[in-house]
């Protein structure tokens, strides 16, 4: 066996002889070259040594990559199964917004979860999208929902700085989180966010994704969506946002509370400058041309929730919900409110409190003004909505004081009295009740007109005792008082608590010709497609004051303003009537009055019901009433009150006392509460003129002014 292996080795090593005589030289050289070892260069050797393990790396790299892909696919599949079926995926409707607009079409407020309406991308200022993309997702137009480059860059910076400074989420991922997921920081939620982001990219264009994002992202201070944020911080629509304002809004997205200009104005401006630099790097703006120093939204943001419009907005939202139920889509509410009068009224009240509040120990004020048919034009529920949302116009029940005497005197007229009827102002006692006049003085023989303008308590006590407290309460309810009234003698002095809203409402019949008014705030509600969802219809008005009593009441109410306790409310050219009211212990001071155009009530007092320093209805309330009504009537035609044919401004300061007329206490009779026919102002004037002419024939020496006014 060994010999055989040796023979094989010898056969391999020997060279067979050539039969051609050894062959040519060329053949011999070739044979010689093929047997010579190859020359190895050192570079090639080094390279081969270095690459010797490369096939191993490739192999194991491929294996690892394959398992990585399988693992990622498994993770995605696992968390995808926890999501609803993809067939059911759809972008949820944005929470509905209630857009409340004034009578002249101006925005009063947005109500709802978002605090503003949705805008199309082309409706927004282009600077907003540029600022958001620059600071939040520079590769927004290049990635597919997830940006590996941006994510790697963010993680690298976090590792270098040894803290989480950047998240690496794209705008699409943030939108997916806002639309579909809960705000929890877990690995599973992040994976689902990525899946949903890729789905959004396949279903919507980049412009649609950006529009959805800007309309749904939270900007702080209760503002969801860019339009709500622009109105919250700058008091204007997102259509008109400038570059520095856009930079400030975009800067809020990282941490709305931290960078809020209302809380941290310096930090907000620092963040806005960072956004501007990012916009410069992206080429959206020129370097060094824009600064945010002059942008100071902090003050506006601080007072946004303090505006007077929120009191009336709360009332409107409650009414909308009652009419429509909970809105499912955006709605537009057209109201009766005047933004101009609201702002003016709030300014007048706050300035008066700032100037006289400490001296008079009064801290709150409220006002409501409506047209004679009940259309509310201004409503101020308190000094500062941001500090207290309690509506002192509709929710507070206070003693109206002498303002309630209006119903006592109206009942006296219905029982056969008139303004010239005489009674004796003297000390009186009804059981244990001893009513006294405000000044502790007594005037002897006075007419009812004079007693009303002087707000004499003794005469009021006599009248309610003769008419019956229950009958007076019935008159008050017929006029518009809805609160429970305690039917006793002191009711004449306004001891039963009522709201300013219903008290003011009850004076509307004196302004509209005797008809009971139903206050309202909403004219029409429409959907975002323009479809009318609700429209107010004119009600069938019922008569609250008979024509023959309306003229006498308006003459006496006008006398209060011209020469009585409400002189500070007297207007320059417009005839006005009204009544002052001061509650026991000077806890409440109010004035309610009317013209042919408006009915307005004003209250001053304290929330804790503590007494003021002798504040009366004829002082600050009457003064502010005058200021407000002069402004509200600045462009209105001067008209007499219904039933009056002479302007109070033309009356002399002092009038002679009229001759007495026979007094008779008539049995109580029911006053119709159904419509007894339309009485125009012209017919009332004609009737009054006939009455005056008849009286002149009998008493030629009596002044016509005395006969009309009665005192």
Image (cartoon, grey):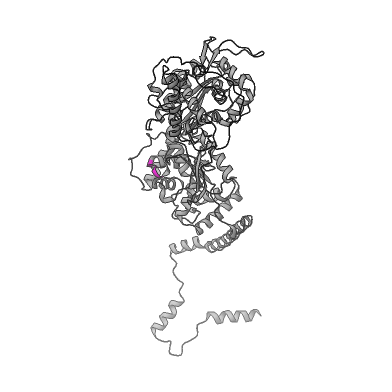
Q: Which residues are magenta?
A: 239-243
In this rendered view, identify the residue nearer to me: 607 or 245. 607
Task: Identify whether 675 is placed above or below 25.
Answer: above
Give percent across and percent down for residue 189: 59, 50
Q: Main secondary structure of the magenta part?
A: helix
Give percent across and percent down for residue 179: 55, 50
Asked where in the image residue 436 lies, by quadrant, the reply is top right
In this rendered view, identify the residue nearer to me: 294 or 541. 541
Q: Is residue 386 magenta?
A: no
Give percent across and percent down for residue 135: 44, 45
Quadrant in which the N terminus appears: bottom right
Task: Identify whether 17 is placed above or below 397.
Answer: below
Q: Is residue 598 left or right of residue 583?
A: left
Residue beneath the point at 42% across and 37% down: 234
The answer to whether residue 307 is visible is: no
In this rendered view, identify the residue nearer to me: 401 or 612. 401
Residue beneath the point at 55% across and 32% down: 544
Q: How many callouts does the rendering have?
A: 0
The answer to whether residue 228 is visible is: yes
Task: Identify whether 597 is placed above or below 405.
Answer: below
Residue beneath the point at 45% across and 71% down: 38
Q: Is residue 241 magenta?
A: yes
């Amino acid at each position: 066996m060994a010999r055989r292996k040796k023979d094989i080795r010898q056969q391999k090593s020997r060279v067979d002889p050539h039969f051609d005589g050894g062959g040519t030289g060329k053949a011999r050289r070739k044979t010689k070259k093929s047997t010579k070892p190859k020359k190895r260069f050192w570079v090639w050797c080094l390279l081969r040594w270095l690459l010797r393990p490369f096939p191993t790396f490739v192999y194991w790299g491929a294996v690892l990559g394959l398992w990585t892909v399988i693992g990622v696919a498994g993770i995605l599949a696992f968390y995808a199964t926890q999501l609803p079926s993809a067939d059911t995926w759809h972008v949820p409707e944005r929470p509905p917004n209630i857009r409340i607009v004034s009578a002249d079409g101006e925005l009063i407020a947005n109500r709802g979860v978002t605090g503003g309406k949705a805008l199309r991308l082309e409706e927004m200022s282009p600077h907003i999208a540029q600022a958001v993309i620059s600071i939040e997702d520079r590769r927004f137009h290049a990635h597919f929902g997830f940006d590996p480059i941006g994510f790697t860059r963010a993680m690298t910076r976090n590792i270098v700085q040894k803290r989480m400074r950047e998240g690496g989420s794209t705008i699409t991922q943030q939108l997916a989180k806002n639309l579909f997921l809960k705000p929890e920081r877990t690995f599973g939620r992040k994976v689902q966010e990525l899946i949903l982001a890729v789905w959004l990219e396949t279903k919507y264009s980049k412009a649609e994704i950006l529009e959805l994002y800007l309309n749904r992202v939270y900007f702080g201070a209760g503002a969801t969506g860019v339009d709500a944020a622009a109105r919250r911080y700058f008091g204007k629509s997102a259509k008109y946002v400038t570059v520095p304002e856009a930079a400030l809004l975009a800067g809020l997205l990282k941490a709305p509370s931290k960078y809020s200009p209302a809380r941290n104005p310096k930090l907000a401006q620092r963040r806005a400058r960072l956004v501007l630099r990012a916009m410069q790097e992206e080429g959206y703006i020129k370097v060094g041309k824009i600064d945010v120093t002059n942008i100071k939204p902090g003050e506006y943001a601080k007072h946004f929730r303090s505006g007077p419009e929120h009191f009336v907005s709360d009332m409107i939202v409650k009414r909308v919900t009652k009419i429509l139920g909970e809105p499912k889509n955006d709605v537009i509410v057209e109201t009766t409110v005047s933004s101009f009068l609201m702002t003016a009224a709030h300014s007048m009240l706050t300035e008066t409190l700032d100037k006289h509040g400490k001296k008079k120990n009064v801290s709150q004020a409220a006002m409501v003004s409506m047209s004679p048919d009940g259309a509310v034009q201004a409503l101020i529920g308190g000094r500062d909505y941001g500090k207290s949302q309690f509506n002192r116009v509709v929710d507070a029940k206070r003693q109206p004081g002498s303002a309630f005497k209006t119903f006592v005197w109206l009942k006296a007229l219905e029982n056969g009295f008139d303004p010239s009827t005489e009674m004796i102002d003297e000390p009186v006692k009804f059981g244990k009740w001893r009513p006294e006049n405000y000044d502790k003085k007594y005037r002897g023989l006075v007419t009812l007109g004079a007693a009303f303008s002087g707000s004499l308590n003794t005469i009021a006590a006599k009248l309610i005792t003769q008419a019956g407290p229950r009958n007076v309460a019935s008159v008050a309810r017929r006029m518009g008082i809805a609160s429970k009234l305690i039917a006793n003698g002191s009711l004449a002095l306004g001891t039963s608590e009522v709201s300013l809203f219903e008290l003011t409402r009850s004076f509307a019949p004196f302004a509209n010709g005797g008809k009971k008014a139903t206050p309202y705030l909403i004219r029409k509600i429409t959907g975002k497609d323009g479809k009318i969802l609700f429209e107010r219809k004119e009600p069938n008005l019922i008569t609250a004051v008979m024509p023959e009593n309306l003229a006498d009441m308006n003459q006496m109410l006008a006398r209060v303003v011209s020469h009585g306790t409400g002189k500070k409310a007297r207007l320059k050219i417009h005839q006005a009537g009204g009544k002052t009211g001061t509650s026991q212990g000077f806890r409440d001071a109010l004035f309610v009055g009317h013209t042919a155009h408006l009915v307005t009530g004003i209250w001053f007092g304290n929330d804790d019901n503590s007494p003021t320093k002798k504040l009366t209805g004829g002082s600050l309330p009457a003064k502010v009433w005058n200021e407000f009504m002069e402004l509200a009537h600045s462009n209105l035609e001067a008209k007499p009150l219904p039933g009056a044919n002479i302007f109070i401004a033309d009356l002399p300061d002092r009038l002679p006392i009229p001759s007495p007329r026979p007094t008779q206490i008539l049995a109580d009779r029911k006053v119709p509460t159904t419509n007894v026919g339309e009485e125009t102002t012209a017919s009332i004037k004609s009737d009054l003129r006939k009455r005056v002419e008849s009286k002149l024939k009998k008493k030629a020496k009596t002044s016509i002014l005395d006969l009309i006014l009665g005192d």
